[in-house]
Image (cartoon, rainbow, N blue to C red):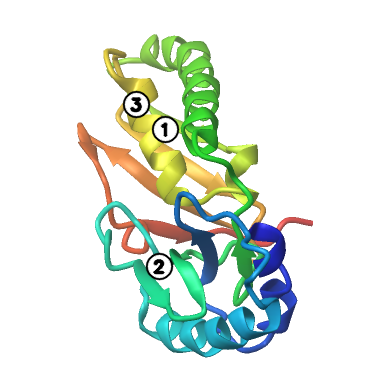
């Protein structure tokens, strides 16, 4: 099914709002039926995606589920889900998800493990500086292929049971306009990424 939908990635270039990036996923059991007509399926999906994309807001834990919409079309026997995320380096682009059932959970588990290792390595050094105010700055190399919301969830899971510093910041150096997002401050996990985003000077 993904192979049938993949051409949409280039067919919709320049037709979607550039302040978000989009992901399209076919529902479980979405097997490409030989009777499906690829051109008709994509012809039906293109206007649906264009219309729905304009109304979606970029996904964060605070905005869910308003960042996604589920639809059914006569030309396609399964549900499709369109979701919007912060643009990263793919503003205005559509990504057809190629994951299999269980892949998302596996990727999240790996991300939690990696973030947890960073926390266990860096936090003790910071906590030794108490009572001075401490700030942990993290840069996740997965950000270019995931999104801030997924990293935020992984960070919260990895932090369970750990003594934390005063503030945790995630740096997005891979964006065209680099920024830092304060995701934890004084005992509170912050869900509104836009409100707590800080612009950084461009990297050389």
* Element marked by disc 2: loop
Location of the N terminus (image quadrant): bottom right
Label 3–label 1 contact, CB within 8 A: yes
Outermost residue toward the right?
204
Label 2–label 3 contact, CB within 8 A: no
* Element marked by disc 3: helix
**Residue labelled with disc 2:** 58
Location of the C terminus (image quadrant): bottom right
Is 124 located above or below residue 112 in the figure? Answer: above
How far apart are the two marked residues, 2 and 1, measured between alpha carbons? 18 Å
| Residue 17 makes an appearance in the image | no
- Left or right of 199? Residue 142 is right
The residue drawn where x is 55% and y is 22% is: 114
Label 2–label 1 contact, CB within 8 A: no
| x, y percent for residue 16 | 56, 84
Q: Quadrant of residue 6?
A: bottom right
**Residue labelled with disc 1:** 154
The residue drawn where x is 44% and y is 43% is: 150
User: N-terminal of the two: label 2 or label 1?
Assistant: 2
**Residue labelled with disc 3:** 157
Of residue 131 and residue 162, the one placed in the foreground of this image is 162
- Left or right of 32? Residue 204 is right
Outermost residue toward the front?
35
| Crowd around label 3: few <14 · some 14–19 · many ≥20 (10 Å) | some
- Left or right of 113? Residue 37 is right
| x, y percent for residue 192 | 29, 57
| Residue 78 makes an appearance in the image | yes
Label count reads 3
The residue drawn where x is 27% and y is 38% is: 185
Q: Quadrant of residue 15?
A: bottom right
């Amino acid at each position: 099914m993904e192979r049938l939908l993949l051409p949409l990635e280039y067919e919709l270039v320049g037709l979607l709002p550039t302040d978000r990036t989009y992901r399209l996923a076919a529902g479980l059991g979405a097997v490409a039926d030989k009777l499906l007509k690829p051109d008709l399926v994509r012809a039906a999906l293109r206007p649906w995606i264009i219309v729905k994309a304009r109304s979606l807001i970029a996904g964060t834990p605070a905005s869910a589920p308003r960042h996604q919409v589920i639809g059914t079309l006569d030309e396609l026997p399964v549900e499709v889900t369109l979701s919007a995320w912060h643009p990263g380096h793919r503003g205005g682009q559509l990504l057809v998800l190629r994951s299999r059932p269980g892949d998302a959970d596996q990727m999240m588990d790996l991300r939690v493990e990696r973030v947890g290792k960073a926390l266990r390595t860096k936090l003790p050094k910071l906590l030794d500086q108490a009572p001075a105010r401490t700030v942990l700055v993290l840069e996740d190399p997965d950000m270019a292929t995931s999104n801030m919301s997924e990293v935020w969830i992984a960070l919260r899971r990895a932090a369970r049971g750990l003594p934390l510093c005063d503030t945790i910041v995630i740096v997005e150096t891979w964006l065209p306009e680099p920024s830092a997002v304060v995701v934890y401050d004084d005992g509170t996990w912050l869900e509104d990424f836009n409100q707590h985003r800080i612009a950084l000077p461009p990297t050389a």
